[in-house]
Amino acid sequence: MDASSTRALARSRASVSIHEGDARATLERDLATGMPQKDLLAVDVFSGDAVPVHLFTAEALALYARAL
């Protein structure tokens, strides 16, 4: 999926990047490599019948806060 996949993102003048994969692992890698902070995080956590618990721990929430 990329930003042109939806009309709203395709029309946006914002710089939009979409990263597929485990949200927590992706953010940890981005922060470790010096990627700039984000203005918005949208995490789609539903991959089956259950929400992955590791995305809602205190450590994960602290990671999200550091990324913003």
Image: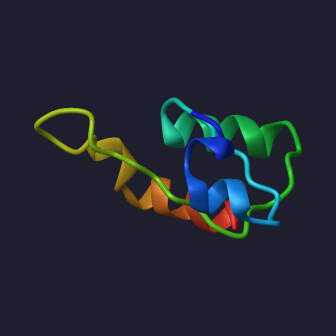
Q: Nearer the viewer, residue 42 or 5?
A: 5
Q: Quadrant of the C terminus?
A: bottom right
At horizontal 55% and vertical 50% (from top left) the residue drawn is 6
Check the image and report above or below for 53 versus 64: above
At horizontal 55% and vertical 63% (from top left) the residue drawn is 62
Q: Please tell me in which quadrant of the rendered image residue 41 appears.
A: bottom right
At horizontal 62% and vertical 37% (from top left) the residue drawn is 19
Rendering colour mode? rainbow
Answer with left or right where residue 4 lies relative to residue 49. right
Q: Please tell me in which quadrant of the rendered image residue 65 appears.
A: bottom right
Q: Residue 5: x, y in percent?
A: 58, 41
Answer with left or right where residue 50 lies relative to residue 37. left
Extreme residue toward the left, this view? 49
Q: Residue 14: x, y in percent?
A: 80, 65
At horizontal 51% and vertical 41% (from top left) the residue drawn is 23
Check the image and report above or below for 59 versus 19: below
Q: Nearer the viewer, residue 42 or 34?
A: 42
Q: Residue 1: x, y in percent?
A: 57, 33
Number of callouts in the render? 0
Q: Residue 28: x, y in percent?
A: 65, 41
